């Protein structure tokens, strides 16, 4: 009936353990749809890994990880119009990325991580404001500084030098740089930083590479809910289009409510991939879209745009249709899909 994320638990947890063992200080990130697994599930897995801190995206996500026994770092920068730190929040660590937010928190004793502006240019204290930081940190529990780095590395390996410049800039301003929270560094870059800055505690914040780092442990399946022979000229669906040729109409689980959209995941790079994208673009301009559902070894065309909980696919005549109740594989973006069920994790 449902769109299911099937997890090979032993393999998946083996990957999580190997990732955690590869270097100290791992901070698992659980945010959004919990990378397909759900926030509470990731909190439990992070606890089982022995992580001392779990990062969530927003303050609204904190209740979903309430069972996590350690500290919870909120990645979204705290703003003065957000709720003020209250009693009973000793385990909450706030990210602060603006001087006015530090001013508003000053003296509250709140635990804060100060985000510095990286080449992402997203959130962070810019270099020219560093001189203003020291007095604003009075009466706050400084848990360290943070840098969120881009995924791309134009011109080689700039992350190590970007992080090093920030360490030097903060120290030059008389700030205590003892712990650094970092996003999107490779294990090699982290190792290099550990050699260059002995005594500095590095806390890599990792989501995708941890939870989705071994895609072979994960399988997404839909079920075949109905199978209807279609004669040329038959009308079908919400839009009452006519079948241009004979075939089979398949009804499968997975629709817009699951985040299954008209866009199938993009073909890979390279010329062949681009030609495929171009071909698909021409067909979609003509009202056709390739679905993310794989039936009999191939991605199949939508019969019409996905419905709320199911999709209708066209199978050409000559392809043996699956049976009612069969499983079909679906290619989805894990961070944009709401599964009905996660199976295999007990
Ligand atoms: C989402 C996020 C992460 C984790 O990103 P992944 O690419 O999923 O590892 C790390 N740091 C920050 C600041 C984030 O917002």
Image: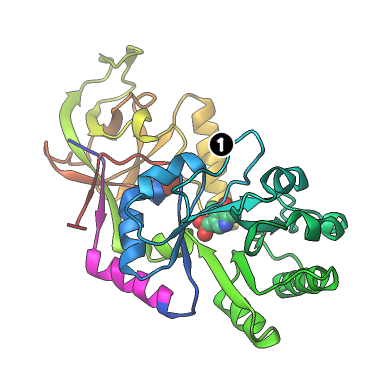
Q: Residue at x 83, y 59 (%)?
A: 130
What secondary structure predominates along the stretch shown in magenta? helix
Q: Residue most toward the left?
A: 324
Q: Which residue is mark 1?
A: 83
Q: Residue at x 41, y 50 (%)?
A: 35
Q: Residue at x 34, y 64 (%)?
A: 47
* Figure quadrant, ligand 1: bottom right
| Pick the front one: 53 or 80 | 80
How far from the left and from the top, in percent, is residue 303? Answer: 34, 26
How far from the left and from the top, in percent, is residue 172? Answer: 85, 72
Q: Up-down: is 340 above or below 185?
A: above
How far from the left and from the top, in percent, is residue 161? Answer: 76, 74
Q: Is residue 9 magenta?
A: yes
Q: Is residue 255 magenta?
A: no
Residue 333 in view in this figure: no
How far from the left and from the top, in percent, is residue 251? Answer: 23, 29
Q: Residue at x 22, y 21 (%)?
A: 231
Residue 251 in view in this figure: yes
**Magenta segment:** 4-20
Tag 1, which secondary structure?
loop
């Amino acid at each position: 009936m449902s769109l299911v994320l099937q997890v090979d638990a032993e393999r998946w947890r083996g990957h999580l353990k190997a990732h955690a063992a590869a270097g100290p200080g791992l901070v698992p990130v659980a945010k959004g749809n919990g990378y397909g697994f759900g926030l509470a599930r990731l909190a439990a897995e992070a606890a089982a890994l022995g992580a001392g801190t779990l990062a969530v995206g927003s303050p609204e996500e904190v209740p979903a990880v309430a069972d996590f026994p350690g500290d919870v770092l909120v990645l979204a920068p705290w703003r003065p119009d957000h709720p003020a730190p209250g009693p009973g929040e000793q385990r909450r660590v706030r990210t602060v990325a603006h001087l006015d937010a530090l001013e508003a928190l000053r003296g509250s004793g709140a635990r804060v991580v100060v985000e510095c502006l990286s080449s992402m240019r997203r959130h962070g204290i810019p270099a020219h404001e560093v001189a203003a930081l020291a007095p604003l940190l009075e009466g706050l529990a400084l848990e360290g500084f943070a840098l969120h780095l881009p995924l791309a590395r134009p011109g080689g390996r700039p992350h190590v030098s970007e992080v090093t410049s920030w360490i030097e800039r903060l120290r030059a301003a008389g700030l205590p740089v003892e712990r650094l929270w970092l996003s999107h560094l490779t294990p090699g870059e982290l190792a290099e930083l550990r050699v260059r800055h002995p005594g500095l505690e590095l806390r890599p914040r990792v989501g995708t590479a941890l939870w989705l780092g071994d895609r072979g442990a994960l399988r997404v399946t839909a079920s075949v809910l109905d199978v209807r022979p279609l004669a040329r000229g038959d009308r079908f669906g919400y839009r009452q289009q006519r079948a241009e040729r004979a075939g089979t109409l398949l009804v499968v689980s997975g629709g817009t409510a699951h985040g299954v959209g008209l866009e199938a995941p993009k073909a890979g790079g390279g010329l062949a991939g681009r030609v495929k994208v171009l071909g698909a673009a021409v067909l979609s301009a003509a009202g056709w879209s390739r679905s993310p559902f794989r039936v009999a070894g191939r991605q199949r065309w939508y019969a019409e745009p996905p419905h709320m909980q199911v999709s209708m696919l066209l199978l050409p005549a000559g392809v043996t249709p699956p049976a009612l109740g069969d499983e079909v594989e679906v290619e989805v973006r894990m961070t944009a899909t709401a599964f009905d069920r996660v199976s295999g994790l007990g």
